[in-house]
């Protein structure tokens, strides 16, 4: 996993982006990251500083929080993710405008979202799918494959990707300029093949959380939405 710091880094050697500023096909590891051994920094394509961390870091972070605050650790991780997503939305809109020459409001939504998430995939946070089929109900489903947190913690029998849920809520909320919430409906750490999140207005997510506590699965909740049942 790679953690990104939004401070810009100036490298001694010109980066690939500096050499080819109009290039968008920066999908190779050595293209996306610029290493400066002399300065001891790693910058990504968008010129933010990155730090390479091990799985031990994730385990230490999660288990350390659980030891200190107990069940509230999930709330703290969600809050961290939410603040991260809010800040990253601002940073994303800046570099997106610089790279593509127009602002996010003028872009195709799916192209916009894939452009935002690609750096996360490159940094080791996993791949995703955004399901807009229930958008008319005010909800979006997000499938996450190879979650850095769930992959590291393994099958612990409960959702563990609270930082991702907060990240999605913070980013999308800042993008549409209204408060949104997100809940993980299923998790790789519960024995599922991938993680699934539901994003929407806070009242809808509160209702979904109630359904989950009552034993509803992600498929149950999506079917209820498709059958016209309201989350309220």
Image (cartoon, rainbow, N blue to C red):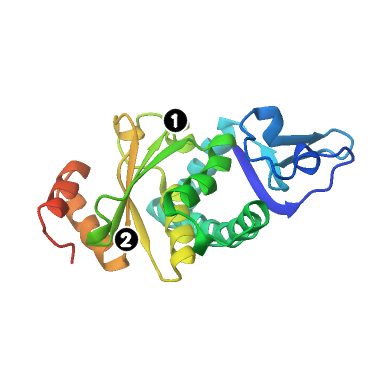
The circle drawn on residue 197 is none
In which quadrant of the rendered view does residue 3 lie?
A: top right
Could you tell me which secondary element the residue under label 1 belongs to? helix
The x, y position of residue 198, in whole percent, is 31, 52
Quadrant of the image containing the C terminus: bottom left
Residue 17 visible within the image: yes
- Relative to 82, say whether 187 is above or below: above
Residue 41 in which image quadrant: top right
Of the residues tagged 1 and 2, which is closer to the observer? 2
- 64 vs 22, left or right, is left
Q: Nearer the viewer, residue 190 or 83?
A: 83
Task: Say which residue appears at 90% left-offset and 40% top-offset.
Answer: 12
**Crowd class of label 2 (few under 14; some 14 to 19; many from 20; radius 10 Å):** many
Relative depth, front residue between 200 and 54: 200
Residue 80 percent coordinates (x, y) = 52, 56
View extreme (bottom): residue: 178
Query: Mark 1 = which residue?
Result: 151
Residue 171 screen position, x and y as percent:
48, 58
What secondary structure is marked by label 2? strand
Location of residue 69 in the rendering, given as x and y in whole percent from the top left corner: 46, 54
Disc with the residue nearer the chain's start (1 vs 2):
1
Left or right, 210 with reference to 8: left
Using a 10 Å C-alpha cutoff, classify the residue at mark 1 as few (fewer than 14 neighbours), some (14 to 19) or many (20 or more): some
Q: Is residue 122 above or below residue 96?
A: above
Residue located beneath label 2 in the image: 200
Q: Residue at x 89, y 35 (%)?
A: 38
């Amino acid at each position: 996993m790679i953690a990104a710091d939004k401070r810009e880094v100036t490298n001694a050697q010109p980066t690939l982006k500096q050499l080819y500023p109009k290039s968008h096909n920066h999908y190779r590891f050595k293209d996306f990251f610029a290493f400066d051994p002399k300065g001891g920094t790693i910058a990504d394509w968008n010129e933010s500083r990155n730090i390479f961390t091990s799985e031990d870091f994730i385990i230490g972070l999660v288990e350390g929080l659980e030891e200190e605050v107990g069940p509230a650790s999930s709330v703290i991780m969600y809050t961290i993710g939410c603040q991260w997503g809010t800040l990253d939305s601002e940073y994303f809109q800046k570099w997106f405008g610089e790279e593509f020459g127009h602002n996010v409001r003028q872009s195709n939504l799916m192209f916009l979202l894939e452009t935002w998430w690609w750096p996360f995939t490159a940094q080791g946070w996993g791949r995703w799918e955004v399901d807009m089929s229930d958008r008319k109900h005010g909800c979006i489903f997000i499938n996450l494959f190879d979650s850095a947190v769930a992959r590291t913690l393994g099958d612990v029998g409960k959702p563990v990707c609270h930082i991702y849920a907060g990240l999605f809520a913070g980013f999308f909320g800042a993008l549409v300029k209204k408060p949104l919430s997100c809940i993980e409906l299923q998790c790789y750490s519960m024995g599922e093949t991938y993680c699934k999140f539901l994003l929407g207005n806070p009242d809808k997510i509160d209702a979904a959380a109630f359904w989950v506590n009552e034993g509803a699965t992600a498929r149950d909740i999506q079917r209820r939405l498709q059958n016209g049942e309201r989350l309220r």
